[in-house]
Structures are given as C-alpha cells and as structure tokens.
Image (cartoon, helix red, strand yellow):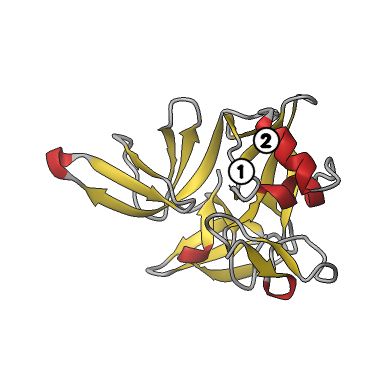
Amino acid sequence: MNHLKRQKMPKNWPIARKGTKFVVKPSSNVIGGIPLLLFVRDMLNIAQNRKEVKKAIHKKNILINGFAAKEDKQAILLFDVVSIVPSKKNYKLVLNETGKFSLEETKETGSKISKVVDKKILKGKKTQLNLLDGRNYLSETKCNTNDSVSVDFESKKIIKCLPLKEKASVLVFAGKHVGSVGTVNKITEKMVELNLGKQNANVLIKQLMVVA
C-alpha cells in the first residue's frame, strides 16, 4: 500500500493530523524516516503539490546524500542530507526537543553519522557493520555494536568510529527522552546514565546514538 492513514502516521512526523485522509508512505523504514514528498512540500514548503516534487526529481534538482533522488516516496532518514540544486541549499533531517523530525540547514554535505546496530565477521575475516539506517558496510575501522560511525557519501566508506564511552555526546532517538542530547556519565549492560543538563536520566542503550 502506497499510503498511510493520516491518523496512523508516525508521531515524529511534523505534519498536521487534520487534513486529507491519507498521506504518502515512505518506500522503506516507515518509523525511522519521512518520505521525500513530505520533506520537500510540507517541511521545506518549496513545492505546492506532488506534481511539482516529481518534476524536480525528474530534472535531478533534488539530491539525497549527494545522489539524485529516485522517487517522491524515498525515505529521508535521520541525519540524511537533502540538497536543492537550484538554490544551492542543503538540509539535514534532525530530531528537535519534542522528538519530532525537523530541518537544519547545513554546509556539511559529504558525510553522516549512524549507529552500529550489529557487527558480523564474514569469510576472509572481513568485518561487516550494519547501521541503524539500514545500510551495511565492509570496514576495517575498529568499531563495536552501539558505537556510531561517520560515513562518507562519495566513497560509501566508513571514515571514523565514535565509540560509546563516558563523556561521549549522545542523541536520544526513541523513548521517554526522545530528542534530548546529553553526555554519558555511566554505562551498564543495557542502560546509560546521561547528564541532560538540568537532570540525569537513565536511557536504554538501544534508544540512543553517539553523535560526538
């Protein structure tokens, strides 16, 4: 099915719940992303309708992480960068303090951060890192599950590991404290104690991502 009922769309979409009965459904990762159509039309407000967005895609005027967008249902995921070619402006998908997707204009268009959710050793002792955004990479970079990595868009390679450790800066992307950015105080088997500025909070490791 290509559409979702508006009342059932993910809570992190910053789209009004009153309006047309249906909204477009992303081609993948319904909870972790938002379709390009809504990103361009409803968040950026640079298109009036779906026809205009499709026309821009056809002219290759919209890039996602440096590559031409393929369709208006294509999912924009956390920290993906959307570039609007005619205006030469770039926008990163982020989470705001209320836990909803938001935009951040950026000049950094060559890479993104994503969380390592699984690590596998393949034949030939090659290491595959599986990331939160669904992408998988063979990498010689030493990194563990729950760390984060910086991925270079052009080479499609991991260029840096951001380990989950004390004093690391993390973003909470799910749960009660979604949207909060804090510093790691202490790590246990499944939980992390975070300093969120005015308070400390215990957050499940699976709900946070190292960002610095």
Residue 36: x, y in percent? 67, 47
Disc 1 from disc 2: Cα separation = 7 Å
Q: Nearer the viewer, residue 89 or 173?
A: 89
**Residue type for callout 1:** Glu
Up-down relation of residue 207 to residue 90 (above or below) = below
Q: Nearer the viewer, residue 14 or 51?
A: 51
63 on left or right of 43: left
Which disc, if any, is residue 132? none
Check whether the beta carbons of the residues at disc 1 and disc 2 lie within 8 A of each other: yes
Up-down relation of residue 12 to residue 64 (above or below) = below
Q: Residue at x 61, y 45 (%)?
A: 79
**Number of other residues with Cα within 10 Å of mark 1, as a class: few under 14, some 14 to 19, many 20 or more:** some
**Number of other residues with Cα within 10 Å of mark 2, as a class: few under 14, some 14 to 19, many 20 or more:** some
Q: Residue at x 41, y 67 (%)?
A: 188
Task: Give the residue number, with chain letter if any, for mark 2.
Answer: 57
Task: Give the residue number, with chain letter if any, for mark 1.
Answer: 71
Whether residue 106 is visible: no
Residue 21: x, y in percent? 77, 71
Residue 34: x, y in percent? 65, 55
Q: Image quadrant for the C terminus? A: top right
Q: Nearer the viewer, residue 123 or 34?
A: 34
**Residue type for callout 2:** Ile
Q: Nearer the viewer, residue 20 or 155?
A: 20
Label 1: which secondary element: loop
